[in-house]
Image: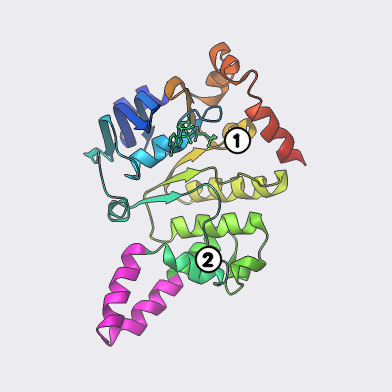
Amino acid sequence: MSAESKNMSGSSAVRTEALNVWLGGTHAVRDVTVAFAAGATSGLVGPNGAGKSTLLNCISGLVPAGSGEVYLYGDRTTGIKPHQLAILRIGRSYQGAQLVAELPAVDNVMVGDHVGLRTGLVSAALGLPGARRAERAARDRALHALERVGLSQYAQRPVKELPYGVQKRVDLARALVSDPRCILLDEPMAGLSRAEKEEVVEVLAGLRVDGGPTLVVVEHDMRVINQLCSDVVVLAAGAVLAAGPPETVLNSPEVVAAYIGRGDSRSEEQAGSE
Ligand SMILES: Nc1ncnc2c1ncn2[C@@H]1O[C@H](COP(=O)(O)OP(=O)(O)OP(=O)(O)O)[C@@H](O)[C@H]1O
């Protein structure tokens, strides 16, 4: 069953209807109707420039929809403000680990705790007695998020001292800290070695086993998609090319043809084995 048809019959974490996004003169997302099932790990793939990040950015409210609709857990959220995502318990990570290099890992993770931090900051600003307790609770949540990605031992280390592969997992902990029901992950394994990717795959697979969030993962490495995802959506030139189980979709002639000459998945594969 395709990612879309499965979601039409079940519950979708994320759904778009005839979504179009223009960036300057570029028609980056073209009439995209797609759905990602609640409780699943889904892949979003496609050659460079296919519109994957733009689709996630539009779903997250970072770029406006030219036309069409976005639904999160059944609610129409087209044009949502990015800060409202946390209230809907949707997490997001970005290409590259956007961390504060000087701060310890745990402090970087606390930055992701929008809901908890807001309460704590208000208490602190007003000098309320609960401020310290709220800060301790936020720190505990951050430590727990680091534990979930296997990084307890790095909690107090400044991020600049950590290898890039570890930084990417700190970024993942930051997306996890406010206990989202769904996380949109934009290339969580970009730039990682094969061994580092396997660690992240293990962490992500473990999250789902523990009843963790729905995951939507943008990824170029098809081996990772095959390992991790129950379904995958392929974008090409801004439009949906195919959707369904990876073993069917990724071998289909039109998907193979979309990648021919681009070398995306192959070069990632090679990079991953270095
Ligand atoms: N700020 C921008 N202004 C104009 N065009 C843009 C902008 N950002 C991206 N684009 C264009 O929009 C299209 C989709 O880009 P997008 O980054 O969403 O693709 P992608 O599939 O995420 O690519 P990659 O795998 O390389 O990250 C591309 O043609 C890109 O050149």
Residue located beneath label 1 in the image: 227
Residue sticking out furthest to the left = 76
Decide: marks 1, 2 in contact (CB < 8 A)? no
Task: Classify residue 132 by image quadrant.
Answer: bottom left
Q: Secondary structure at mark 1?
A: helix
Residue 187 spot, x, y in % from top left: 54, 42
Of residues 271 and 65, the one nearer the viewer is 65
Q: Nearer the viewer, mark 1 or mark 2?
A: 2
Range shown magenta: 114-140
Residue on which disc 2 sits: 100
Q: Residue at x 44, y 74 (%)?
A: 139
Residue at 32% in and 55% down:
86
In the rendering, at what x and y percent does residue 211 appear? 43, 49
In the rendered image of this protein, does residue 146 appear above or below residue 203?
below
Residue 9 drawn at (x, y percent) = 30, 26
* Circle 2: residue type: Val
Q: Is mark 2 within 8 Å of ligand 1?
A: no
**Type of secondary structure dominating the magenta stretch:** helix
Check the image and report above or below for 252 versus 186. Answer: above
